[in-house]
Amino acid sequence: MDIFERMKRDAGPLGQYQKIAEGYFMFPNLKGELGPHMRFNGREVLVWSLNNYLGLANHPEVRKADAEACEKYGMAYPMGARAMSGQTKYHRQLEEELAAFVNKPSCYLLNFGYQGMNSIIDCLCDKRGRDVIVYDAEAHACIIDGMRMTNCKRFSYIHNDMASLEKRLVNATRLANEQGGGVLVITEGVFGMTGAIGNLKGITDLKEKYNFRLLVDDAHGIGTMGKTGAGTGEYFGVQDKIDVYFGTFAKSFAGIGAFVASEKTIIDYLKYNMRSQIYAKSLPMPMTIGALKRLDLIRKHPEYKDKLWENVHALQSGLKERGFNLGRTESCVTPVYFKSSVSEATNMAYALREEFNIFCSVVLYPVIPKGEIIFRLIPTAAHSLDDVNYTLDCFGKLKDKLDSGYYDTGEVVKIPELIEE
Ligand SMILES: Cc1ncc(COP(=O)(O)O)c(C=O)c1O
């Protein structure tokens, strides 16, 4: 079949919703200053869908640092890949400061979290496929896609289930020994959709029995978890047992780019072998200098994280008191689970936006398993307790109607006309 013909016939699991969702549920255009109060489709909304955990996105010092770096260097600088012509003292300084922050000897910058993770996995694994990967069944797409780049055999273990991991480790160890390779275990520190915390304590305890290297994707943990915000390894007191630690700038750091931290020889190996960085241009200067400023603020202002957690606790306990199911979250990620149909969920999300001016993301398959629908709320340090209380009132009203079957119309809501401002 012609490739284009196939794509026209089947738009894919998310693409099938384009006609009924675009501009409103999918690809919505939030306008105004980044923060809890923005404009959407002609009105002010209370936003719960930005991973701006520490509220840095619109912090005046961040905005100033970004603007000054842009003014001084432009977006082009430095030109070329790090290894060829893209090195600067700021890139190195950021790496040194990040390494110290996450308590690892060495660190290397990545242009993007997603591609960075792909490339780390590709680079860590044996090119002849002798290694074996054991990964959490709920791992993020960047982990799945990274594994697909390798020739290595892989086994998933039941999400956060240490008995299942151990079973997999037995088989993986046997296979790796036969093949002359090693074992790589991969998990997220905080699972970005469910909010569950990866059982890093349990995983690292298994290191006493099995020989493996541990790679942790801490995209949602960096800045939010641990005493200093150094992430989920710090939270569990096992950072030294994480062999390769990954964090992104796309969430708490409110920027773009990412980093990988490990012992020096391993970072040196990654620097010279990681294809996402060797064959791509260096992180632009505003992102690099901007990340230095963000790191500085994170270190100097633990109160941002404290405020974040105050909001998290207030929101999560209030939702639970009102009978909502938040699943397994133990982190800032606040998923509200519904067993609803797509039509009922869109009716509710529509009511939240149109009646209550509350904007949160609606997540469905393939981002999460089939049959589940999540309204995903991300509290930030920039939200106020008034924002939380207002949201709890509205969710309470929503629940009354949901329980009475009000939203179960059997029809997907027709999205309103989109207003250009
Ligand atoms: C767990 C996890 N890993 C990696 C990424 C990718 O990060 P980035 O947005 O920096 O590409 C994300 C972001 O969605 C994530 O949630």
Image (spheres, rainbow, N blue to C red):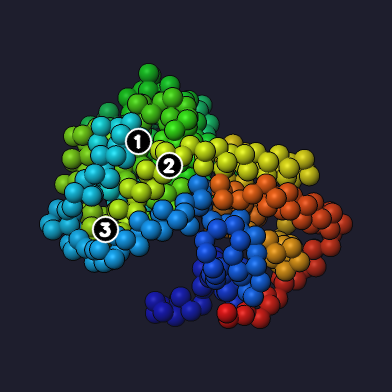
Q: CA distance from mark 2 to mark 1?
A: 10 Å
- Nearer-the-camera pick, 123 or 105: 105
Q: Residues within 10 Å of mark 2 (few under 14, many from 20)?
A: many
Q: Counting residues from the N terminus, which is met first, the one under dot 2 or under dot 1?
A: 1
SS for tag 2? helix
Residue sitting at x 43%, y 21%: 205
Position of the N terminus by quadrant: bottom left
Q: What amino acid type is highlighted by mark number 3?
A: Met
- Nearer-the-camera pick, 96 or 4: 96
Position of residue 193 measured from the top left corner of the image (x, y, whole percent) = 55, 48
To which residue does mark 1 refer? 101
Q: What amino acid type is highlighted by mark number 2?
A: Ile
* Left or right: 331 in relation to 8: right
* Left or right: 51 in relation to 415: left
**Label 2 with label 1: CB-CB less than 8 Å:** yes
Q: Counting residues from the N terminus, which is met first, the one under dot 1 or under dot 3?
A: 1
Position of residue 337 measured from the top left corner of the image (x, y, whole percent) = 68, 49
To which residue does mark 3 refer? 285
| In the depicted structure, whether residue 182 falls above or below residue 61 | above
Q: What amino acid type is highlighted by mark number 1?
A: Phe
| In the depicted structure, whether residue 349 falls above or below residue 200 | below
Q: Residues within 10 Å of mark 1 (few under 14, many from 20)?
A: some
Disc 1 C-beta below 8 A from ligand 1: no
Q: Is residue 209 visible?
A: yes
- Nearer-the-camera pick, 404 or 159: 404
To which residue does mark 2 refer? 298
